[in-house]
Amino acid sequence: LELDGVQRKVEITDDAQVDGLPSLKHHGGFGLRVTLEDLIKLATGQDAETVLDGESKRRYLGGTILLCIDYTNFQTMDPLAKHPVEYVLSARLLPFNTTFRDKVTHSTDGGRVYESVHGILIRGRIH
């Protein structure tokens, strides 16, 4: 887990608590589960309220979080690859000023429909 630029080894189980990221949990056979609030903290080192409603106004202007999952089971002298897989989970808030989309479409009654989408876009990279 990489938080605040520091990589630390954490074993994530069904009942384990990760310091600073209380929602990060193992979710049965389906992998990990994390809330957007904790994902924002992982990406910025700040709490979600500060990022969304603070000076940057990310709730309105939007933002893009790049979630990176790197994994390996490399171990010296392990030709049968029996070493368990280890993951490094990290996130970054990309340096864009805005991330939102405006769209105008024509309605069936001859008018126009204006749609504006604001929020946090999450992009993933698994390597």
Image: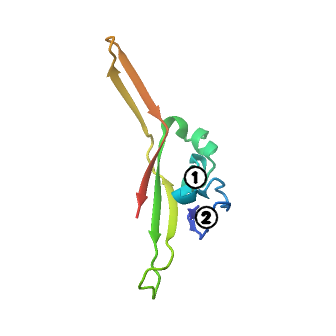
22 sits left or right of 62 in the view = right
In this rendering, is residue 22 above or below 119? below
Residue type highlighted by circle 1: Val
Q: Nearer the viewer, residue 87 or 6?
A: 87
Q: Nearer the viewer, residue 78 or 76?
A: 78
Q: Position of residue 82 (x, y in %)?
A: 47, 80
Point out the tag, 1 or 2, that comes first from the N-terminus: 2
Residue extending furthest top? Answer: 109
Q: CA distance from mark 1 to mark 2?
A: 12 Å
Residue extending furthest bottom? Answer: 77
Residue at 61% across, 64% down: 12
Q: Nearer the viewer, residue 106 or 55?
A: 106
Quadrant where the C terminus is found in the figure: bottom left
Residue at 46% across, 86% down: 76
Q: Nearer the viewer, residue 25 or 94?
A: 25
38 sits left or right of 106 in the view = right
Badge 2 is on which residue?
12
Residue type highlighted by circle 2: Ile
Does dot 1 land on a helix, a strand or a loop?
A: loop
Quadrant where the N terminus is found in the figure: bottom right
Q: Position of residue 109 (x, y in %)?
A: 33, 11
In this rendering, is residue 83 above or below 29? below
Badge 1 is on which residue?
34
Residue at 41% across, 58% down: 125
Q: Residues within 10 Å of mark 2 (few under 14, many from 20)?
A: some
Asked where in the image residue 126 lies, by quadrant, the reply is bottom left
Q: Position of residue 113 (x, y in %)?
A: 38, 20
In this rendering, is residue 85 above or below 37? below
Cβ–Cβ under 8 Å for marks 1 and 2: no
